[in-house]
Amino acid sequence: MTVVIVFLLEVLKIYSYILLAYAFISWIPNAYDSSIGRLLTSLVRPILVPFQRFKLQFLGVDWTIVLVLFLIHNLSRILSWLL
């Protein structure tokens, strides 16, 4: 059981970095059209789309990524507590 939890924690950490990279490439013009941009988009969009129905776009920023990162962080804390 411990091995599974540690594996899930590592997957969540790696996915958090992928989300951050996806957010950072939004600042670079045409970055989504590059091969890295398409890869990141294909990894991130399936998770972000269900949360985008909450309409978290305000002040010119899409806060959906922040919500997903917050949920990943809380899930990581719960998994760490189970260890």
Image: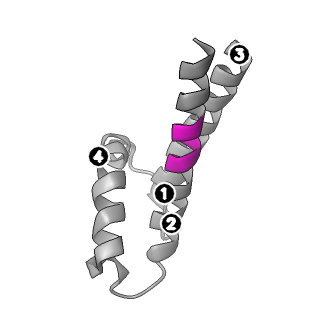
In the figure, is residue 52 to the left or right of 68? left
Q: Earlier in the sequence, mark 2 or mark 3?
A: 2
Q: CA separation, marks 2 and 1?
A: 5 Å
Contact? badges 2 and 3 (CB < 8 Å): no
Q: Which mark is residue 46?
A: 4
Q: Earlier in the sequence, mark 1 or mark 4?
A: 1
In the figure, is residue 71 to the left or right of 48? right
Asked if residue 81 is positioned above or below residue 57 in the image, the reply reads above
Foreground disc of the pair 4, 3: 3
Q: Which mark is residue 18?
A: 1
Give amino acid for label 2.
Answer: Ala
The quarter of the rendered structure image containing the C terminus is: top right
Contact? badges 1 and 4 (CB < 8 Å): no
Q: Residue 83 carries which label?
A: 3
Contact? badges 2 and 1 (CB < 8 Å): yes
Identified at 70% across, 23% down, the residue is 80
Q: Write the start and end of the magenta stretch as one range.
A: 10-15
In front: 7, or 65? Answer: 7
